[in-house]
Amino acid sequence: MSRTDDLTRWLGLEPCADGGWASAPGGHDFYDGSLLDQRVMAFRTRLLDADRPRTGWRRTDADTVLVRHPPHGPDTVLRLWTSDGRGRPTARPLGGHPSPDEPFQLTVRGGQWYALELLEGEAGLWSEAVVPGIAFGEGTQPAAPRPPTAGEAEQRDGRRAGSDGQPLHELLGLTPHVEGGYFRQYYESTAGLETPRGRRPLANTIHYLLDRDSPVGYLHLNRAHITHFLNSGGPIQYLMLSPDGEVHEVVMGEDAAAGQVLVFTCPGGWWKSSRLPEDVSHGLISEIVAPGFDFRDQSLASADRIAERYPAAIGRLRPSIRG
């Protein structure tokens, strides 16, 4: 059984018309418990391997956020090609290792041609989120820019930068989050929509990091759906409390046999916490919130509040409540 066979079976991937494999799309259709007039974001997971090492050129009117998954490193190199209005291609690595020069998250703005290529390694995995989600299947391929050349790639790829022992949150420019851990916003849609709680961007994204100095994301609630994508490290343990009082557990990681996942969505209106096991150094993820995150949509849990409303769950959740 090949690595590709393992990954396609684990992630439910099927051959894709523009190259490689793709999962069935998911998306965000609700906000604060109510159905939206449009799908504000849609996403899927993609795979390239040595036999199918590149996608076709593609463009859509929507923004496309690309998020790299493990495996990665010097032996697995994914490259993003984009093209300007004159058909001139440029290349950039997508997530070789945690550094500003090889980010795990890149955005292709609406109307721009792009393609992905696996340069090295047996398999390269990423997810792509399209904002707004109604444009997910509207990519076009006729009259694409000319194919890139290897020489151009060598000239335009970013240079690898070593961390020299610098903490990961400093290397990536992350700052402490009120929930615990560290974060940095990377993308926000310029388009928005009206909600019962005010105007929100269609979507925004962050990096979120837990490490040994801040290993817990304390229990909190958001009104919008949040989809999580594993970038590096882990496993990360998540506990979620649904409005009916049921506790759900999800583990983000690379061990399919143990039931771990690379991507999951926490519905809006659910309480959520995250934690690093004691033997794990870090867990770096990307999150996309759609409709976009606003601190007015967030609530931090108190032990008294959870105990009063969900007495059967408080024992399990108490270690994840701050204070």
Image: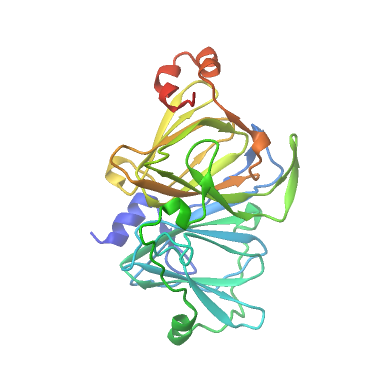
Of 33 and 182, nearer the camera is 182
- List the single residue furthest toward the left: 1
Which residue appears at 51% of the width and 72% of the height?
115
Which residue appears at 29% of the width and 55% of the height?
6
Observer able to see residue 262: no
- The percent coordinates of residue 317 (x first, y second) are 43, 23
Chosen colour scheme: rainbow
Observer able to see residue 89: yes
Q: Is residue 202 above or below residue 138?
A: above
Of 3 and 142, nearer the camera is 3
Count of numbered marks: 0
- The percent coordinates of residue 154 (x first, y second) are 44, 82
Which image quarter: residue 84?
bottom right
- The percent coordinates of residue 284 (x first, y second) are 43, 49
- The percent coordinates of residue 132 (x first, y second) are 66, 54
Q: Quadrant of the N terminus?
A: bottom left
Q: Is residue 258 above or below residue 123?
A: above
For residue 150, side relative to residue 110 (left or right):
left
Which residue appears at 51% of the width and 26% of the height?
242
Of 279 and 128, nearer the camera is 279
Which residue appears at 34% of the width and 50% of the height?
10
